[in-house]
Image (cartoon, coloured by chain):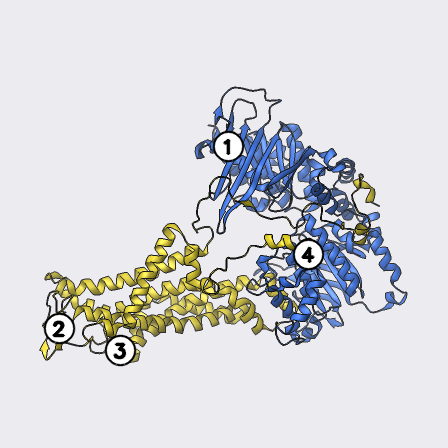
Chain colours: A blue, B yellow
Amino acid sequence: MTQTPASDTPVDPSTTDVVSIKNLSVSFSTDRGAVKAVDDVTLSVRPGEVLAIVGESGSGKTVTAKTILGLLPETATTRGAVVLRSKDGSKSNDVISLSKKQLREVRGADVSMVFQEPSTALNPVYKVGWQIAEGIRAHSNVSKKEARERAIEILGRVGIPEPETRVDYYPHQFSGGQKQRIIIAMALVLDPGLIVADEPTTALDVTVQAEILDLLRRCRDDFGTAIVLITHNMGVVADLADRVAVMYQGKLIEEAETTKLFAHPEQDYTRALLAAVPRIGQGLSQTRARTAERDAEWQAKTPLVSARDLRIEFPGRMGRGGFVAVDGISFDIREGEVLGLVGESGSGKTTTGRAIAGLNRVTGGSLTVLGQEMNGVKERAFTRVRKDIGFVFQDPASSFNPLLTVAECVAEPLVIHKRAADAQDARARVDELLEAVQLPRAYGDRYPHELSGGQRQRASLARGIALDPRLLIADEPTSALDVSVQARVLELFAELQKEFGFACLFISHDLAVVDLLADRIAVLYKGKLVEEGTGLEVLGSPKDPYTQRLLASLPVPDPVEQAQRREALRALVS
Amino acid sequence: MNTTAPKTEALSFKTPRTGGFFSRLPVVHQLRQSMGWQRGMLITGLVITGVFVLTALLAPLIAPYGFAQRKADSLAFGTQQPPSGEHLWGTTVGGYDVFSRVVWGSQTALFVIVIAVVFSIFLGVLLGLVSGYFGGWLDRVLVVLCDAIYAFPSLLLAIVMSIVISGGRSSMWGGILAAAISITVVFIPQYFRVIRAETVRIKAEAYVESARVVGASSSRIMFRHVLRNATRTLPLIFTLNSSEAILTLAGLGFLGFGIEPTAAAEWGFDLNKAVSDVSTGIWWTALFPGVAIVLVVLGITLVGESLNDLADPRLRGRRAVSAASGDVAETSVVPGGTLTAGPGGLDGLETPDPIGDEPGEVRS
């Protein structure tokens, strides 16, 4: 360690780095010995700059950021130096060598954090004003009244309407986006020189994400706060960051200005990472080819799935009305067609998919799945239809029984529908399926936790197509995956669809992903179908104002273009 | 795909399988995993429990006299004799050999534990599974019933049972069954609660839904997918209940609802008979059965507690690592450069570099 732990010599605050990380290495003690998470990383953040750290999960980006706040768990050991300077330049500290008490003084005052999940980062039993004031009173000796006034002021500055009354609200009275604003207010209230934002928009819908990104940009411009932004979303990076650091397996492999990195990535890995980001418009040629293959009769055939005024209501608590998740939507899925269902969280897209698979009860209207009316269906009547339906779940980590091998899991549908006596008997078919999804046969003998996320999702696909279904329902199959893995899974998905020719309901919140695969796109908003049409119609010239806003909010991985889109969105919203 | 095969080899986290099947057995696995004071706790518990089980099994060989024996070679032992070469731990007020009674008592205790746990574990797990999986009115009725049983003090229930089964004064098996059945009644709700809670949690897991989607029957889902994943906490309740079983048996014996001294040895009964001795300075009749109860309960509880700690990664102790040691795990699935196809599918495959210099140009 070359740095002195604390030096009080004032430096020029406008030029020296807010934080400079030198040769940082972090190791964790695990059940299987030491694992290195960060390997010799040197980074620095200038005042008023947004530095984005990007990389796959497990690349060490979060660990690096948490080191700045001294938030690593006890199982971690650290080497190197993280020198943090206060905003006015009056003191600088090496975070690694600080005691717990000194760390408390630094946190909040010199550096603060914005968390990924706003709903869990606020304490539900305290008023938000109290939670903000607590941070103020922990660092400076101010009266309760004064702290409250500062809380009101900061709430107003982060765009909470009527802060004088809202300061006495509890967290559950705010929406997700507003909660994230409050978290940012808490981070800003002591005017720190640096904010660490760990995936600040990942848990938010894309329209809310655009607002939060705007707010973070204002943090930098109005407050002069530097931001370390950790994200896997290249669109967010293009939108907000001034400089980008790419991490790969614990190492910093590339660092450049945002425009330079997106235009001329130097490392192969960065290039691959950027190429893997789906962009709207890429699926067009594929869709055209598929449409051309279909004959005129195709349109006239009975659809596999047909919904008319479909309504799904969840029973409410005693004395309260039910919650309407899907409110009178109508659509068709024909043989061999991919319908993309897009919407924000709570729009009813997953409920619709689950209703088709018989996992949710239909409460109104009509839903016909492979000739079976689902309104009031009995499980016994639906069982014969089940062999023609495949389902791919969102989270590959939980969609496999952890105690069965991958081969046994993939064999389950075959055994249940009596195509094979047991998992052993089905092995030949399972091996074929694993090969179809590009997994080595030997992986069948492994347990699900021994596979990576992408491999598990491929095995999940293999299970979905095991019975050669006519309809596959994919519920956000790639949203739990890293962008590079997502690219491979989507590619495989398209190939399988081409080979097996199943019809598919593809549910996603990401317009670009849906555009890659879907023949037609349906946009759901608060349980209602607001727009439906081919990818070209819906994404090329959206008619519904919500679709327009959704499309405009989607950040594209190109800083120059994103700046123009930002202006367009602002014009659209105002 | 050949390019990624060796990569993924390194990426997967394998549990070390050095000991094969043996090292993956419940307690053995935890023993290998443990370290530091947690390991000390577990080993202490295991040793005490092991000694207890061995004593119970080998009681006929270890005990110098029978549990109901009052004279050897037609010569009475004498009552309240202090420890001597003849009687290692002295004799009781009834003229029994204390050492032999303590050794034989372990056998009675073991029987009660085994019977109580076997009875309650099967019923409790089955009820919990069915109740948690199907829910509805059956679930509500069972939950209320279990809550009602919780309200009963287990000792009171045990007394009622012992009166019902054997009229209070009983033979060896009558006494053992009375204790075991009363403990069973009290323990079923515990297993029921734990398994039900786990089942309700697992029922919402994606792999159960995926089994439902492919059309698996309810019994197949329950026993193949839910049950095996719901039993993680059983070893813990198992050990804690075992120690409670011993305490209930001892309590019964102490209150005089235990087993006749001529039918079997029982620690609680001996303690009861030793109450008057304590004030007269005869310490050996109370000390040894008392210590036996404390040690067995302590041993089994230690095993249970350390299993609990080891099952939770946040409580589990680990060896400290030196600064910045270890290797970087292979976390990446698509290492730089091997991504040959872009997300555009075949279109991406045809052009070697799908980005080009102008990322915007692929847009329509």
Indicate the chain on which mark 3 is placed. B
Same subunit under labels 3 and 4?
no
> Residue A288: which quarter of the image?
bottom right
Indicate the chain on which mark 1 is placed. A
Between discs 4 and 1, the one toward the N terminus: 1
Label annotation for residue B95: 2
Say what secondary structure mark 4 lies in.
loop
Q: Which amino acid, by three-letter code, is at mark 2?
A: Gly
Say what secondary structure mark 2 lies in.
loop
Indicate the chain on which mark 2 is placed. B
Q: Nearer the viewer, residue B185 or A437?
A: A437
Q: Which amino acid, by three-letter code, is at mark 1?
A: Val
Between discs 3 and 2, the one toward the N terminus: 2
Residue at the spot of label 3: B172
Q: Nearer the viewer, residue A524 or B298?
A: B298
Q: Which amino acid, by three-letter code, is at mark 4?
A: Pro
